[in-house]
Amino acid sequence: MSLILSSMLTLGTTAAIASLVLFVISKKFAVEEDPRIGQIAAILPQANCGGCGFPGCPGFAAALVKAATEKGSIDGLSCPVGGAEVMDQVNSILDSADAAPQASAATPAKSDAAKPSAPAQLKPMSTDPKPFVVPDIDFSGKKENPIPEIKCGPKPAIIPANWPK
């Protein structure tokens, strides 16, 4: 019975020490994130389409906050899925966050030209299919080696009408 009790005490003590060490390490190496990123990511349509040029909506939100912080403008960045309404909401979040530090600090206000603004007109994404090239496959090689040689040529793909979809 004493062997079981000593084993349980040893295991419990080891678990308590390990959890305390992990807690301290997690607090020491915690990464602080700008809260505006989460607010903007919640507004975006969460389509994760890549139409904005970034890997998903959280990546686009981080790029918007970074551009507004570093350059003071988000010109050239837009969400084609959300449109102008979403970009207006993003601008209001970025403007309200910019106004709060300026009110507390005695710094001059930014000019209107430097404020982030939504593009006047969003460009729609292209729906034209890209040309697909069918490779030429040469099966005339040695019969011992059944691996064909693939040659990519400029022939456009012609898909038969009875091709399965």
Image: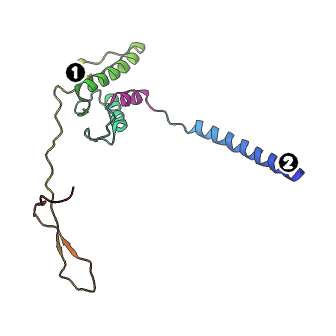
Question: Which is nearer the eye, 86 or 118?
Answer: 86
How many neighbours does mark 2 have within 10 angstroms: few (below 14), some (14-19), or many (20 or more)?
few
Q: Residue at the spot x=36%, y=34% of the render?
A: 62
Segment colored magenta: 33-44
Q: On screen, 45 above or below 132?
A: above
126 falls in the magenta region: no
The quarter holding residue 18 reads: top right
As helix, strand or loop, the secondary structure at mark 1 comes to helix
Question: Which is nearer the eye, 22 or 148?
Answer: 148
Q: Residue at the spot x=28%, y=26% of the render?
A: 86
Residue 160 horizontal side relative to residue 51, left or right = left
- Nearer-N-terminus badge (1/2): 2
Give coordinates of residue 111: x percent, y percent: 25, 18
Residue 7 horizontal side relative to residue 144, left or right = right
The quarter holding residue 153 reads: bottom left
Which residue type carries mark 1? Ala
How many neighbours does mark 1 have within 10 angstroms: few (below 14), some (14-19), or many (20 or more)?
few
Q: Which mark is residue 5?
A: 2
Give coordinates of residue 119: x percent, y percent: 20, 27
Which residue type carries mark 2? Leu
Q: Which residue is mark 1?
A: 113
Give coordinates of residue 127: x percent, y percent: 16, 43
As helix, strand or loop, the secondary structure at mark 2 comes to helix
Q: On screen, 151 above or below 98?
A: below
Give coordinates of residue 69: x percent, y percent: 35, 28
40 falls in the magenta region: yes
Q: Residue at the spot x=35%, y=33% of the render?
A: 61
